[in-house]
Image (cartoon, rainbow, N blue to C red):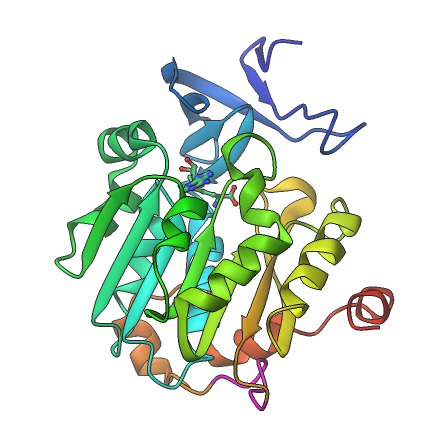
Amino acid sequence: MDAISNGWFSEIQDDLWPGQSFSLKIKQLLHKEKSKFQDIQVVETETYGRCLILDGIIQCTSRDEFSYQEMISFLPLCCHPNPEKVLIVGGGDGGVAREVVKHPLVKEVHQVEIDDRVVELSKKYLPSMACGFESEKVKLTIGDGFEYMKNHKNEFDVIITDSSDPIGPAVSLFQDSYYELLKNALREGGVVCSQGGSFWLDFDYVKKTMNGCKLHFPKVGYAITSIPSYPCGHIGFIIGSLDANRCLRDPIKKFESTEIDSLHLKYYTSQIHSAAFTLPRWIEKHFYA
Ligand code: SAM
């Protein structure tokens, strides 16, 4: 089935999310190409602004991206006492880099993205996200995050995996062995946070990935954010800390509302941080059993 038909893009993924699909009305197809790693489309939508689509899956829309980018960045940053050196894996649109550099204690951000075409097209079509690459704190490497991690030991305070879904080039970023590499790449007390799917749709996958994380991290949590353009209108984050005494739902760094305003945060607050870890009963039982 053609993903764009009669002026609508439909996210039809029979393997990942059988029997359902989210659709957006399209004003214009701005770009379409097949890179070395994936199909890339950028579209102008009628009500969600610009939208980046990889292998037929929505990655971000300008209307609601801040919910995801702020939460995947500030949840782990605020769980670390001094997040000076941060690694971002994936994140080719630049939105996570844009958020991470805002944290007052962050000094250095390294980013490894597999597909330079995503970066280039984001600079052209999604400047409000790709502005993240303009910060002097950010050093971008084009390469595979899994391979990169093998060569970096005891180096980072926080590692954020802003990957696409577990098909195509991102499959390795959801494996148990990836969490072992993450652990080795962290300094003492380090924190990781990964895009963790939806508990409505990816229940087994989330549970399996959390179990992989638990093999290497003494403290593991799952937090959620509300975001209409992702399947089922929400997405989760898997967060692991090497500090066994860390309570993930209590942010170490608490921002006053004046700070929230000066950092231009629209979604993340210290209250949202804690609330994000509060899960429905049946999910809590399964994920923390
Ligand atoms: N927020 C988005 C989501 O949840 O769907 C993810 C956005 S970001 C565009 C995902 C990026 O991960 C893509 O640019 C993709 O090229 C990159 N990626 C996928 N696999 C990767 C890998 N093995 N190493 C580094 N980057 C990878």
Image quadrant assignment for residue 101: bottom left
Q: Residue at x 57, y 17 (%)?
A: 8
Q: Residue at x 79, y 29 (%)?
A: 18
Residue 171, position in %: x, y? 58, 39
| Frontmost residue, 80 versus 32 | 80
Numbered marks: total: 0
Query: Which region is colored magenta?
Result: 245-251
Image quadrant assignment for residue 272: bottom right
Residue 195: in sight, yes or no?
A: no
Residue 37, position in %: x, y? 43, 24
Q: Residue at x 39, y 40 (%)?
A: 144
Residue 166: in sight, yes or no?
A: yes
Q: Quadrant of the N terminus?
A: top right
Q: Residue at x 69, y 50 (%)?
A: 198
Q: Quadrant of ligand 1?
A: top left
| Frontmost residue, 72 versus 85 | 85
Question: Residue lying farthest left?
Answer: 136
Per the picture, the main secondary structure of the magenta-coloured stretch is: loop
Above or below — where is 69 with respect to 42? below
Above or below — where is 96 with respect to 77? above
| Frontmost residue, 148 versus 124 | 148
Residue 126, position in %: x, y? 30, 36
Q: Quadrant of the C terminus?
A: bottom right
Residue 134, position in %: x, y? 16, 50
Find out whether residue 165 is within the magenta segment.
no
- 20 to the left or right of 218: right
Above or below — where is 284 with respect to 133? below
- 7 to the left or right of 116: right
Find out whether residue 247 is within the magenta segment.
yes
